Image (spheres, rainbow, N blue to C red):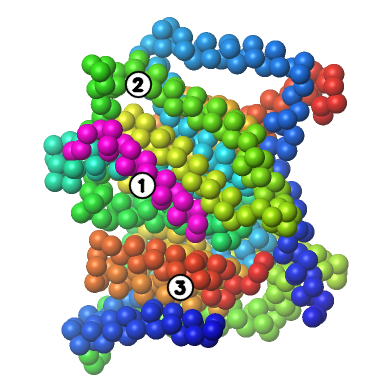
Amino acid sequence: MRKGWKWFWTLVIGLPLIVFVIWGLWDNTRLFVVTFLNGMTLASLYFIVAAGFTLVFGLMRNVNLAHGSLYLLGGYVGYLVAHYTGWFVLALAAGFAVAALVGLLMQVSVFRFMPGEDLRQTLVTIALSIIIADLLLWWLGGTVHQADAPELLSGPLRDIPLIKAYSKYRLALLPIGIAIGVVLWLFLNRTRVGMMIRAGVDDRAMLSAAGVNVNVLFAVTFAIGAGLAGLGGVIGAVELSMAPGEDVRLLLASLIVVIIGGMGSVVGAALGASILGLAETYGLAYAPTYSVVFTFVILVLVLAFRPRGFLGRPA
Amino acid sequence: MSAANWRNAMNSGAGRAVMMNRGQVAVALPLPGVGGNRGLSLISAIRARHVVVLAFLLAYPWFATPFFTFQIGAQSLALGLIALSLTFLGGYGGMVSLAQITVAGIAGYGVAIFGAASAADTAISLGWPWWVAVLISIVIATAGATFIGWLSVRTEGIYTIMITLAVGVAFYYLCLQNYSVFNGFQGFQRVHAPTVLGVSMRDPLPFYYLVLFWSLAGYFFVKYLLRAPFGIALQGIRDNPRRMNALGFNVTAHRIAAYAVAGVMAAVGGVLLVWYNGLIGPGSVGTSWIINILIIAVLGGMRHPIGAFLGAIVFVLLQTFAIDVFDRERFNLVIGAVFLVIVLFSPDGLLGWWAGLKSKFLTPRGGVR
């Protein structure tokens, strides 16, 4: 019986998707393939940002609603560093470091003193996000900042069959996203600190009783999570551009990614980011004024059938 | 079954609920006994206070300037009504929904779309009589609130904030991107209160009394509801959903019903707010307002329905006069800092601060802490 329902829903959701894919390929192959690439490259940005969000939530039950502000901060810092030094790698490192430092500061000076009060922590992150956003507006103004891609990756890559040309930088985002995912996976599954983090996700009290200094672990995790937001910011400063309001956009994306993928799961974040990135770009390409509706429908469907997301476990 | 599974099973129910509540009590929750522990001897005092406040509210526009009546008085009360719906949900239902301004926004957009807006928007506005437009808007907004509730009660605790925030921001982007129904970035201008029986509701005095009437109605409705069986059950569900379920209460249905009730209040507040502003657009339902409503509710304190209005008055005063002290551009910095201080040092808002002061200086005569 249950299996029957599963088949039913797979058909109801899958069949229109397949029809759409076939129609899209037949109607305008180039548009379809380019949109797919756009979706996946956007997804890798979403993944990088949301992975930090989900990591912090998984371990500390802290919904860091200032995550978007950290993204914006990292993006601005990366833009300035790239602008003045011209080294994109240095900009990436600076974006990561500054956001990680601010995240560390938040954890050490505020959240450490309210353990277990997850609602209060969330309210604090909301207050911090308002303050950070306004400080950034004060500092850099409301103009749009767009960083240039590094020389190696600037310009289009030509002579690709079917789609002719595609931005090198955007194409490079795919391996970057995958690389960060693999590094994160290796870190979580193959190192001692990663092992502690996973143990902490499952049972914080037991980990503490086993002699691990949970406060240090929390600080490290928060710094990494915030740093990933900053790193995403630098990447996004080139891919999308930086302006006030982008923090909300990436916060919404992170929220939806982790709601769809499941809180605290890095693989879930990858899955959620792919779904969201594809839905958003296909929506924009094929039904511009309703693109956010697709995102919303996906959110509703996932919540209706899998309230904890695809790979989420009961908290 | 492994030990970890057992632990999970134990944690997922009562244990977790207790933990969650500990977190929430610290922020905003009213003590379960607050409504009930006013002794008989206190009744007269409380009544005197009520009478004074009510008299002040009624007399206010007669000694205040029209600016104070309209910009401060009416705006505070309208925002307070929306914040009250959040206080009801968050303080008594244990569900902090960030989508209350979204519900209000749906009602506001409804008034503009079904009713009359400026001449430029006639292509979209249907121009129905104002009372039809208002009724339909409130019904649609309430249905929307119920739907949001149905979505978000599937998960618990901190997830609620995330889901309702996602819904709220998604609605903002829908309003921003869609031109055929929501008129995109522009929104609707000149959505004015109607003229009823020769009295123009746009004028400060009638509008103030209109808002006052609905705010008082909302306030006393919440006060009544909290002592009705539904309200008691809701507070029980907030404190321990598992036990209430075992007692035979339908936890999910109660929660969704709470969302619907709060939705009606937010919708009424939304109609009043759109009349106050005279316009509605994506900016009226954007993140800053999503967060402002939360700030208002937390600022006043979610221990008591009056907190929403207290918070609204402080917020509106800050919003109006902070620009004289600080730079106009830096209002967000000021309100963010105030919010941070309140959350860090007085989690129960101004009410909690007041209670703390009272217990410090007035040594309690009874058994009250």
**Number of residues whose C-alpha sits closer than 10 Å to that of mark 3, classed few (under 14), some (14–19) or many (20 or more):** many
Quadrant of the rendered image containing residue A53: bottom right
**Number of residues whose C-alpha sits closer than 10 Å to that of mark 1, classed few (under 14), some (14–19) or many (20 or more):** some
Give the quadrant of the C terminus of chain B.
top right
Start-end of magenta stretch: B127-151
Residue B334 coordinates in the image, percent (x, y): 51, 34
Residue B192 coordinates in the image, percent (x, y): 25, 29
Q: CA distance from mark 1 to mark 2?
A: 24 Å
Q: On the image, numbered disc 2 is attached to which residue?
A: B207
**Could you tell me which residue is drawn at 80 percent across and 80 percent down?**
B2
For this rendering, which residue is in front, B247 or A94? B247
Q: Secondary structure at mark 1?
A: helix
Q: Is residue B303 magenta?
A: no
Depicted B66 relative to depicted B253: above or below: above
Q: CA distance from mark 3 to mark 2?
A: 48 Å
**Could you tell me which residue is drawn at 20 percent across and 54 percent down?**
B180
**Could you tell me which residue is drawn at 38 percent across and 79 percent down?**
A12
The amino acid type found where label 3 is placed reads Ala
Q: Residue furthest front?
A: B248
Q: Are marks 1 and 2 in contact (CB under 8 Å)?
A: no
Q: CA distance from mark 1 to mark 3?
A: 32 Å
The amino acid type found where label 1 is placed reads Ile
Residue B193 seen: yes
Q: On the image, numbered disc 1 is attached to which residue?
A: B140
